[in-house]
Amino acid sequence: MGGQVFVSGDHACVATDQPGLQIVNVANPSAPTVVATTNFNRKDDFVCRDVFVVGNRAYVVGYSLGLRILDVSDPANPVQINSVSNNPIAVWVQGSYAYLASTRRLLVVDVSNPQALQTVGIYSNTIWAQDVRLFVDVSHAYVDWAASYGSGPWDIISITNPAAPVRVAETNGSGAIGDIEVRSNLVFLAIEGGSVEAWRVRSARR
């Protein structure tokens, strides 16, 4: 299920199954206006699953789309800079790295030079997930491997060394997780059905 949103300045980038990526002018919240739409010339039903924006670059991912990096300095005319084929579902960008979560793996991709993308680290999961939620802080990635399709494990993965991501904790929520958010040492899980769980992380250092 697509539909992730990232707001940057006066524009919101919306990743949808169809028609794909939409860029919406939200300067006037009462009258949002779509200024650009792209499906990356794809005709499948699951074009975009997630989007993350840093400065003038939008990082868009999807099952068969892979990772697409767009120059959105002109929101009405996004221009693709580069792409990687790796079937990600969720994306988070921090510093020089993009963290891409797929149904089985967390990939760490060096995006410091968008013209020469390089995968520098891989963490492989032991299960196959139908959907994924991702949150990244300075030293850890928090990954739920079964969001929206039933309860499943969520992991804390150390990314202190981007070339060697390693799991430091694993646990299960009490239901299907719709989203995950981290504040300090608290992990908040939005459980489908209307509840929220708060987990205290006492130590996830490695």
Image: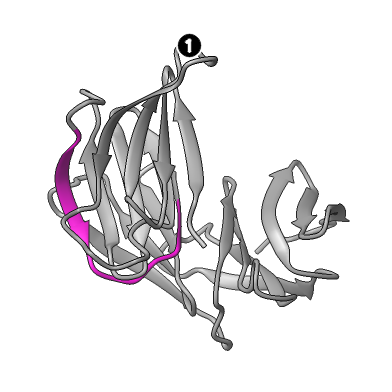
184 over 175 or under it: above or below: above
87 drawn magenta: yes
Counting from the top left corner in percent of width and height, residue 76 is at 22, 26
- Name the residue type under label 1: Asn
Residue assigned mark 1: 28
Judging depth in this view, the residue of 22 and 68 nearest the camera is 22
Residue 56, percent from left and from top: 28, 28
Is 10 on the left or on the right of 154, as rendered?
left
Q: Is residue 45 left or right of residue 73?
A: right
The answer to whether residue 40 is above or below residue 57 is below
Residue at the bottom extreme, as displayed: 126
Q: Which residues are magenta?
A: 78-91
Q: Nearer the viewer, residue 122 or 19?
A: 19
Q: Position of residue 142 (x, y in %)?
A: 63, 59
Image point 43% across, 19% down: which residue? Answer: 9
Whether residue 105 is in magenta: the answer is no
